[in-house]
Image: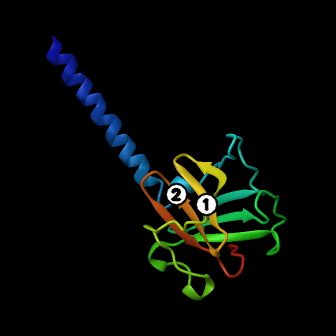
Amino acid sequence: MRSYFLMRAMRVWGLLLASALVLGASGGAGSQFIGTWFDSKGKPLDTRVLSVGRGCDEGWVILNLAWPLGSQSTGTPETLRQFVRDPGAKHIAQDQLEGTFDGDATLPRDAASSGFHRGDWELRLSASDEHYAYLVSMDRTERWPRSKSLFGCA
């Protein structure tokens, strides 16, 4: 009887694990960044403050950040900064960005927390280098380059 329950539990665990892998895989590249972000007090951020979404096609992600930090963007270049996650530079021409993506970056010493987070990820910015946004988790730091102009999809 005991082995029956053990076998049953292992089967259920296997199904749950398989489901999690499938759901994670179907989320696509960068899906962990897409959705609601929160401030330092756990309050959901208005999308005019920070939003993260897919680019015009699958494979790249855009982080829209109101500027100055914490304000609400009107969607103009003066009030909005965009940072791009395009591993392998497959979707955006390098000359449209102020730098390169790094999926295993070193965080600059002056990179300060914005207080904005989603799950395990936190947004940090460096005062000495405004060309990048740093997305930091417990085991990884990604460096996203700033776009030279605002992207929009036709």
Residue 135, image x, y percentages:
55, 60
Q: Please state if 149 lies on the left or on the right of 23 as rendered.
A: right
Q: Earlier in the sequence, mark 2 or mark 1?
A: 1
Q: Residue at x 81, y 63 (%)?
A: 73
The front one of 105 and 30 is 105
Which quadrant would residue 4 be assigned to in this image? top left
Kind of residue sitting beneath label 1? Arg
The front one of 139 and 119 is 139
**Picture quarter with the N terminus:** top left
Residue 49, image x, y percentages:
76, 57
Q: Residue at x 14, y 17 (%)?
A: 3
**Picture quarter with the C terminus:** bottom right
Kind of residue sitting beneath label 2? Val
Q: Residue at x 39, y 42 (%)?
A: 20
Q: How many marks?
A: 2
In this view, the residue farthest toward the top is 1
The colouring scheme, among rainbow, by chain, secondary structure or one colour, is rainbow
Q: Please state if 104 lies on the left or on the right of 34 as rendered.
A: left
Q: Does residue 10 show up?
A: yes
User: How busy is the neighbourhood of tag 2: few (under 14 within 10 Å), some, or many (20 plus)?
Assistant: many
Q: Residue at x 46, y 68 (%)?
A: 105
Question: Helix, strand or loop at disc 2?
Answer: strand
* Disc 2 to disc 1: CB gap under 8 Å: yes
Can you say whether 28 is above or below 80 in the image? above
The front one of 23 and 101 is 101
Can you say whether 13 is above or below 19 in the image? above
Residue where numbered disc 1 is placed: 124
Residue where numbered disc 2 is placed: 136
Q: Does residue 56 show up?
A: no
